Amino acid sequence: MKTETKEDIDYETLSLGDLLSAYKAAKDRKKAIESGELAEVKAFLEQAEVLITRKMRDNGLRQVQDESGQATFSLTDEIVPKISDWDKIYPYIAENGYWHLLYRKLTARAYRELIEAGYQVPGTDPEVLTRLRMRSN
């Protein structure tokens, strides 16, 4: 199935019905790609990354080129947090003003639940986003 590109179609001139059909066809194509070949490629890449990392470590290598010399692979180490006790982290952040350690985003579902229950969350204003949903029959 060939998905037509923007160069092939002027979407602005399509009727709503034709645009909806084109949207559904593109979503179906995306799903087929993601669950088919793309899923296989992602699975291979994940497995290969683990194996390459292990083999490079086993051989004491931090940087290596592929056989063709067209790609260089290197291992880098990165420190990331592994949370062992949230009850200790929050007071530490508050006492030191290290708010930059936290993502600055509220969980939308929990926020909605509070608003719908009649609570107001200080420092926030509810914003309504309109999203397009599609259900296939």
Image (cartoon, rainbow, N blue to C red):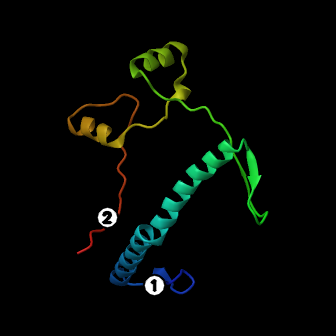
Q: In this image, 118 relative to 78: left or right?
A: left
Is 97 situated left or right of 25 in this image?
right
Vertical order, 40 against 96 (above or below)? below
Q: Give whichever of 21, 120 is nearer the camera.
A: 21
Residue furthest to the front: 59
Q: Image point 55% across, 28% down: which residue?
A: 100
Q: Quadrant of residue 1?
A: bottom left
Q: Which residue was labeled with disc 1? A: 13
Location of residue 71 with respect to 86 vertically, above or below: below
| Position above or below: 103 against 96 | below
Q: Position of residue 46 (x, y in %)?
A: 53, 55
Residues packed near mark 2 inside 10 Å, few (<14), some (14 to 19) or many (20 plus): few
Residue at numbered disc 2: 133
Specify the quadrant that holds the C terminus: bottom left
* Relative depth, front residue between 11 and 50: 50
Question: Dot 1: what SS?
Answer: helix
- Residue in view at x 52 percent, y 65 percent: 41
In terms of image quadrants, where is residue 80? top right
Query: What amino acid type should be assigned to the residue bearing mark 2?
Result: Arg
Residue at (66, 42) in percent of width and height: 57
The percent position of residue 25, horizontal first and vertical second, equals: 38, 79
Q: Relative to residue 135, is residue 63 drawn left or right? A: right
